[in-house]
Amino acid sequence: MTEAMVAANGVDLCVETFGDPEAPAILLISGAAASMDWWDAEFCRRLAAGGRFVIRYDHRDTGRSVSYPPGAPGYTGPDLVGDAVGLIDALAGRRAHVVGLSMGGGIAQYLAVEHADRVATLTLMSTSPGPAPDLPPMADRLKAAFADPAPEPDWTDHHVVVEHLVESQRPFAGPDSFDEAYVREVARQVVDRTVNLESSEKNHWLVDGGEDTRPRLGEVTAPTLVIHGTQDPFFPSGHAVALAREITEAELLLLDGMGHQAPPPSTWNLVVPAILRHTAP
């Protein structure tokens, strides 16, 4: 297991790898405002133990990667796609199994249609083909959380920011899938590693997302696995059903009770074998 700064797409990104670099590579792409820490190290080790070279990384403005002033991200959504391409080229021999979560799933879809030669297989987790009137809306409990947001924390007080992160994650989880102690430990790692906490929480939401890829999902040639929680309040499971329908021969795995979150340890016995099967030669 090694962590290093890697030059990709003209910027420095913090990357951590697990397993044999000669093994088939899996690139894990986090969601908005999420550093690599949300891909649990033990989750990565389990994938690596299955004969994979696992790459997780900090997006721009998260963790130890390049940072921009709060409220002024100097990049676009397509730049974040370019970062993933750059890492695949630098670390995976120009081709990887791509696993994207939430916003990372949007990046992964873009990769699959614009850079198909880089994508060996595609795994889309807790994500959506894009907002549209035919897809189910956000759950009322999450709408209420957005309507009454918590006050902005003192970004210099790490204890306060940890608790802010914990509480910000709570409404996204399934009603019975929020492990507060586990989320708090991940939040501590995030706060300890992040160069600019305020930028990490604000800037991704200000970025132009780029082209809508939904009309092109039928062009995806990479074998695709869609993994989604049945209690996802942000993208209800109808979004996953749409992805699986619109991408040719995609497989759908629904996780009972899971919300909009990185796979918690309680799901690993299902998720890890599913990804290993999907990425097998």
Image (spheres, rainbow, N blue to C red):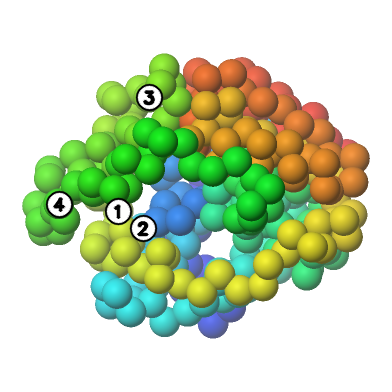
Disc with the residue nearer the chain's start (1 vs 4) = 4
- Residue type at numbered disc 1: Arg
Sequence-first tag of 3 and 1:
3
Q: Give the structural element (helix, strand or loop) at label 2.
A: loop
Residue 186 lies left or right of residue 43; in this view the side is left
Q: Relative to 266, say whether 87 is above or below.
A: below
Percent of width and height locating residue 22: 74, 49
> Callout 1: few (<14), some (14-19), or many (20+) C-alpha neighbours within 10 Å?
some
* Relative side of 258 to 250, left or right: left
The C terminus: image quadrant: top right
* Residue furthest front as drawn: 133
The amino acid type of the residue labelled 4 equals Pro
Kindly identify which numbered label has been placed on residue 193: 1
How far is the residue under mark 2 from the one under mark 4? 22 Å
Report the front residue among 32 and 98. Answer: 32
- Is residue 34 visible in the rendered image? The answer is yes
Task: Say what secondary structure mark 4 lies in.
Answer: loop
Q: Which one is in front, 49 or 231?
A: 231
Q: To which residue does mark 2 refer?
A: 63
- Which residue occupies 10% across, 56% down? 154
Which one is in front, 2 or 258? 258
Give residue 151's mark: 4
Dot 2 amino acid type: Gly
Mark 2 in CB contact with mark 3 (< 8 angstroms): no
Residue depicted at 68% across the width and 48% down the height:
134
Which of labels 3 and 1 is toward the front?
Answer: 3
What residue would you read off at disc 3? Answer: 178
